[in-house]
Image (tube, grey):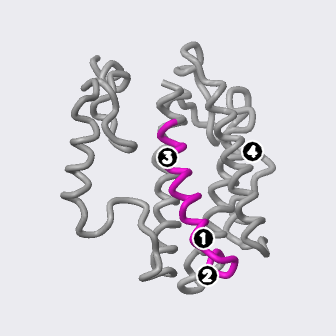
Amino acid sequence: MKDLFVKRFEYYKSLGDKTFEQLTDEQMFWQYNEESNSIAIIVKHLAGNMLSRWTNFLTEDGEKSWRNRDGEFVNTFTTKQQVLDFWEKGWKCFFDALDKINEENLYSTTYIRGEAHPVIDAVLRQLAHYPYHIGQIVYIAKMIKNEDWNTLSIARNRSQQFNTEMKTKFSNQDPDTNSSPVCLQNSPEVRDEYKQ
């Protein structure tokens, strides 16, 4: 199960990484209006969440006393590199925590703001939260780059071509293996988990 989690989160992290590669320093801080978040602010919130939730996650509440969540929505970065460094710091903390998950503790209790969660639920909670914000990052970047945006998914008007390529690529593959970097419908690990 841990490997499955890591694979999913690595994919979503890669969407952020590929987005940042396309942006200048200035574009990392662009805001649509005063009420909107820049990419830099979204990164600050995401990494802040990761550091709070996953530092000593098996023994401490995920909402740390040292976290200032409201402050995560106030930009304090001045360069793109500072944003990227914080992004990497958050992900390192998170992946280090995922590495500590095993069959013995997968259903043990962890806490977030005093609320008990099985470890697996705490991970699934973030599997909804982190891609939500990464989607915001990608959407903002697409608005900024406009016609200069390099797509991270299937290019417009290329769905049929992509489908054909995927079918050809996996036609000789064992049907029980994953068929896509995103879709897990053919994963025996997932099927076994939901046979109950």
Where does label 3 land, which residue? 11
How packed mark 2 is, by other alpha carbons closer than 10 Å (few <14, some 14-19, many 20 or more), is some
Dominant secondary structure, magenta: helix
- Residues at circles 1 and 4 in contact by the CB criterion of under 8 Å: no
The numbered mark, 2 or 4, whose residue comes first in the sequence reads 2
Compared across the picture, whether 12 is left or right of 44 comes to: left
Where does label 4 land, which residue? 64
The residue range painted magenta reads 7-28
Disc 2 from disc 1: Cα separation? 7 Å
Figure check: 85 above or below 110: below
Q: Residue drawn 62% across and 39% down?
A: 112
The numbered mark, 3 or 1, whose residue comes first in the sequence reads 3
- Residues at circles 2 and 1 in contact by the CB criterion of under 8 Å: yes
Q: What is the three-letter code of the residue carrying label 1? A: Ile
Compared across the picture, whether 178 is left or right of 96 comes to: left
> Residue 31 location in percent, x, y?
58, 82
Figure check: 152 above or below 166: below
Q: Mark on residue 30?
A: 2
Disc 2 from disc 4: Cα separation? 30 Å
